[in-house]
Image: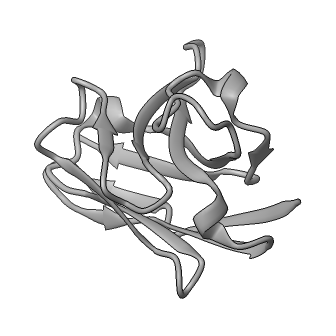
C-alpha cells in the first residue's frame, strides 16, 4: 500500500501560480503512475494531469494544457504539479492518486487509481 498526502493548496488571484505537492509513503513511488484529479462543487471529478512511473510520459487535460506542468522525484517520493496562469475555473479540491495498473502507462480514469490523498483546496479569485 501507499499513503498520499497533498499540500500546497490555498487562495490565489487569477493569473497567479501555485505548486502542489504529493508526498508518498509506503511502497516505492516508482511502482506507481501518478495522477492529479480535481472536483469542483457540482461537477464531476476529472483528471487534470498524470505522469508515468519513470516520468517519461505525461498527460494534461485540454483545460490546463500549457499552464500546468507535472513532475516527479521518485527519490523523494513526491509528485509536483506546477500550476501557472490560474483561472477562477481552476477552483476545486485537488486530489493526488496512485495507480499500480500495468496499462495504460498513464491512466486517466479514476477507476485505475487505487490510492488517493485527502485532497487540498485551491481557490482562484477573480
The colour style of the image is one colour
Q: Position of residue 17 (x, y in %)?
A: 23, 62
Q: Nearer the viewer, residue 93 or 79?
A: 79
Measured along the vertical axis of the image, is residue 90 above or below residue 4?
Answer: above
Judge left or right: residue 86 versus residue 5: left
In the image, farthest residue toward the right:
1
Q: Nearer the viewer, residue 106 or 121?
A: 106
Judge left or right: residue 46 versus residue 64: right
Quarter the N terminus occupies: bottom right
Judge left or right: residue 66 versus residue 117: left
Q: Position of residue 93 (x, y in %)?
A: 58, 42
Q: Residue at x 11, y 42 (%)?
A: 66
Measured along the vertical axis of the image, is residue 111 above or below residue 72?
Answer: above
Q: Residue at x 79, y 70 (%)?
A: 27
Q: Nearer the viewer, residue 58 or 19?
A: 58
Judge left or right: residue 103 versus residue 88: right
Q: How many marks?
A: 0
Amino acid at each position: 500500500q501507499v499513503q498520499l498526502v497533498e499540500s500546497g493548496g490555498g487562495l490565489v488571484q487569477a493569473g497567479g501560480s501555485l505548486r502542489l505537492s504529493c508526498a508518498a509513503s509506503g511502497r516505492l513511488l516508482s511502482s506507481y503512475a501518478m495522477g492529479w484529479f480535481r472536483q469542483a462543487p457540482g461537477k464531476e471529478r476529472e483528471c487534470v494531469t498524470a505522469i508515468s512511473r519513470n516520468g517519461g510520459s505525461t498527460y494534461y487535460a485540454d483545460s490546463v494544457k500549457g499552464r500546468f506542468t507535472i513532475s516527479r522525484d521518485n527519490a523523494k517520493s513526491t509528485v509536483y504539479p506546477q500550476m501557472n496562469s490560474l483561472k477562477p475555473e481552476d477552483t476545486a479540491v485537488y486530489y493526488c492518486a496512485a495507480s499500480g495498473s500495468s496499462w495504460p502507462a498513464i491512466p486517466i480514469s479514476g477507476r485505475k487509481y487505487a490510492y488517493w490523498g485527502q485532497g487540498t483546496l485551491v481557490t482562484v479569485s477573480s
